């Protein structure tokens, strides 16, 4: 029998059983729709996160922290270490950063603020492409009582004002220091691991004197080109005998991408379970269908239909269901992904852009003022694979009932009531 005739007979058989066909197709639609939605959202999410991290974590920056993430004891960092690192091949500049918390008082309000002790000149050289002044400028020369303030929706002070910082030195010692505001930054969010918005910046020597300590919390290293970042990072690890945490933005982003790929694969595996369940349903329904169509099969064999023709017809019916389910599921899956892409950013905007790295300053891990958007990634190859996978599932689970139908004895089939 010609292929066109088999397809026509299969289509007519499905049309005569519209309700059953619709319910069978629905299972395939749900399975493929889930896969399409998950893959589209995951691709869009990964692209968005990578883009936001690339924007925040400059790929030509290496960050050295005193804490070992590997569970070791860690190592103390000093300004001398930054000076030594600045001499490494591929390093443009290295600057030490000291971080503390204080209560910042102005004539109008007060708030708990993260204060960073930095070398202003070096810090601005490292983040020259991110830091811009909303008001004021970098003073020259820098006085020990100079402070620069990060962006705030409601500024706590303006350029020229004096502010007081209350430092909690120990359980029995609190010190107050007065600073003059030299400038305020535009909205930045964060630079490296340094939250800029709502923070305060003072000369590192001043903060060291306040706490009577020469230990710094981190060293920010700017390399000549992003391609040199990993080799410089390895050199720094060797310098500290692997006792310091060295964060290379490019490798961090790559590792995060691998994690997101694993999560996507896990979610797709869950979505595939729906297809397997649909396949089992197809096998059950087609097995029942073979019993109901026993006399029909007997008549076809009596008229000369061969076993392979019966087998081909039942498999074609399953293939039509799978293909039809896939074609319906693609636009539905993309629609679900698009809707979720609108809902999720609204639901998680504050968590993603406001506090992923803490700092309490509204900068978060992705920077203040960064709007988190989620646009589904439409990959034609992924969509094609999803449809083919659904088609394969339906055919595989239809093989048993199809073979059962093709093996029926025509005489016994004609006698079947």
Image (spheres, helix red, strand yellow):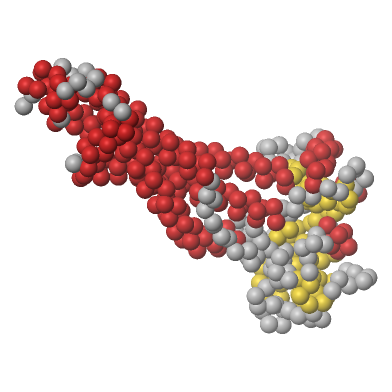
Above or below, 29 against 396 in this view is: below
Residue positioned 79% across, 79% down in the render: 159
Locate residue 85 relative to residue 62 in the image: left or right. Answer: right
Locate residue 253 relative to residue 33 in the image: left or right. Answer: right
Locate residue 139 relative to residue 45 in the image: left or right. Answer: right
* Residue 340 placement: quadrant: bottom left
Is residue 150 among the parts visible in the rendering?
Answer: yes
Residue positioned 50% across, 48% down in the render: 40
Above or below, 158 against 396 in this view is: below
Q: Which quarter of the rendered picture does the C terminus lie within?
A: top left
Q: Nearer the viewer, residue 25 or 336?
A: 25
Above or below, 327 against 127 in this view is: above
Q: Nearer the viewer, residue 365 or 99?
A: 365
Residue 230: x, y in percent? 78, 40
Total marks drawn?
0
Is residue 213 among the parts visible in the rendering?
Answer: no
Q: Which quarter of the rendered picture does the N terminus lie within?
A: top left
Residue 81: x, y in percent? 87, 46
* Residue 35 placement: quadrant: top left
Residue positioned 82% across, 77% down in the render: 136
Residue 200: x, y in percent? 75, 67
Q: Nearer the viewer, residue 1 or 382?
A: 1
Residue positioned 21% across, 18% down in the render: 407
Residue 406: x, y in percent? 23, 21
Q: Nearer the viewer, residue 106 or 319?
A: 319
């Amino acid at each position: 029998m010609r292929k066109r005739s088999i397809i026509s007979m299969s289509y007519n058989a499905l049309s005569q059983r519209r309700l059953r066909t619709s319910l069978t197709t629905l299972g395939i639609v749900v399975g493929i729709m889930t896969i399409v939605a998950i893959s589209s959202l995951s691709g869009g999410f990964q692209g968005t996160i990578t883009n936001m991290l690339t924007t925040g974590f400059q790929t030509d920056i290496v960050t050295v922290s005193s804490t070992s993430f590997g569970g070791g004891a860690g190592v103390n960092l000093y300004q001398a270490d930054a000076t030594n690192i600045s001499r490494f091949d591929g390093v443009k500049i290295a600057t030490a950063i000291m971080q503390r918390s204080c209560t910042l008082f102005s004539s109008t309000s007060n708030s708990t603020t993260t204060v960073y002790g930095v070398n202003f000149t070096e810090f601005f050289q490292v983040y020259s492409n991110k830091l811009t002044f909303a008001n004021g400028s970098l003073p020259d020369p820098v006085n020990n009582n100079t402070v620069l303030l990060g962006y705030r929706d409601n500024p706590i002070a303006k350029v020229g004002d004096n502010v007081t910082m209350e430092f909690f030195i120990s359980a029995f010692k609190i010190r107050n220091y007065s600073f003059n505001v030299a400038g305020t930054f535009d909205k930045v969010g964060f630079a490296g691991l340094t939250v800029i918005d709502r923070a305060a910046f003072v000369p590192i020597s001043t903060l060291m004197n306040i706490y009577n300590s020469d230990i710094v919390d981190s060293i920010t290293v700017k390399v000549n080109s992003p391609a040199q970042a990993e080799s410089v990072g390895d050199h720094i690890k060797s310098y500290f005998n692997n006792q310091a945490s060295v964060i290379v933005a490019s490798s961090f982003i790559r590792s995060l991408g691998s994690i997101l790929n694993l999560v996507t694969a896990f979610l797709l595996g869950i979505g595939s379970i729906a297809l397997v369940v649909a396949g089992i349903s197809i096998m059950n329904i087609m097995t029942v269908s073979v019993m109901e169509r026993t006399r029909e099969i007997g008549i076809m064999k009596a008229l000369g239909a061969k076993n392979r023709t019966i087998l081909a017809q039942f498999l074609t019916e399953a293939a039509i269901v799978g293909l039809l389910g896939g074609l319906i599921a693609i636009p539905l899956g993309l629609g679900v992904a698009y809707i979720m892409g609108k809902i999720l950013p609204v639901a998680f905007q504050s968590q993603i852009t406001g506090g992923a790295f803490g700092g309490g300053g509204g900068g978060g891990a992705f920077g203040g003022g960064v709007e988190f958007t989620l646009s589904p990634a439409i990959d034609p190859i992924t969509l094609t694979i999803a449809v083919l996978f659904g088609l394969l599932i339906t055919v595989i689970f239809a093989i048993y009932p199809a073979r059962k139908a093709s093996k029926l004895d025509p005489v016994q089939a004609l006698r079947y009531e």
